[in-house]
Image: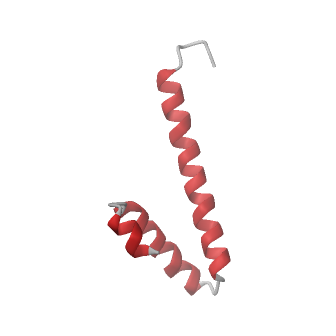
Amino acid sequence: MIEPLGQLGLKGMVSAFGQAVTTGIRRNRSAMEILTERLKAEAAHLGTLGDAIKSKFTPHGNS
């Protein structure tokens, strides 16, 4: 899974995924638990990023 991410040029994702796997293994987590935690973290990041983009293009006073 790491190799395709690298081929796509997603260096940050490769690093984050590698770190998540390493941490998950140390904590005796299953593959499903590791992937779930990674997906939750990514969703939180994208939500924050989306909020930042939306606020940049939303006129003040309009939500």
Please state the total of marks drawn on the protein image. Answer: 0
Looking at the picture, the colour scheme in use is secondary structure
Residue located 47% across and 25% down the image? 56
Please tell me whether residue 61 is drawn above or below residue 25 in the rendered image. above
Residue located 63% across and 59% down the image? 40
Residue located 50% across and 41% down the image? 49
Residue located 61% across and 71% down the image? 35
Please tell me whether residue 11 is drawn above or below residue 34 in the rendered image. above
16 or 5: nearer the eye?
5
Relative placement, left or right, of 4 versus 21 is: left
What is the x, y in percent for residue 3? 38, 75
Answer with the quarter of the image where residue 13 lies.
bottom left
Answer with the quarter of the image where residue 30 lies.
bottom right
Please tell me whether residue 12 is drawn above or below residue 35 in the rendered image. above
What is the x, y in percent for residue 25? 56, 85
What is the x, y in percent for residue 9? 32, 60
What is the x, y in percent for residue 46? 54, 47
Position of the C terminus, as image quadrant, is top right
52 or 39: nearer the eye?
39
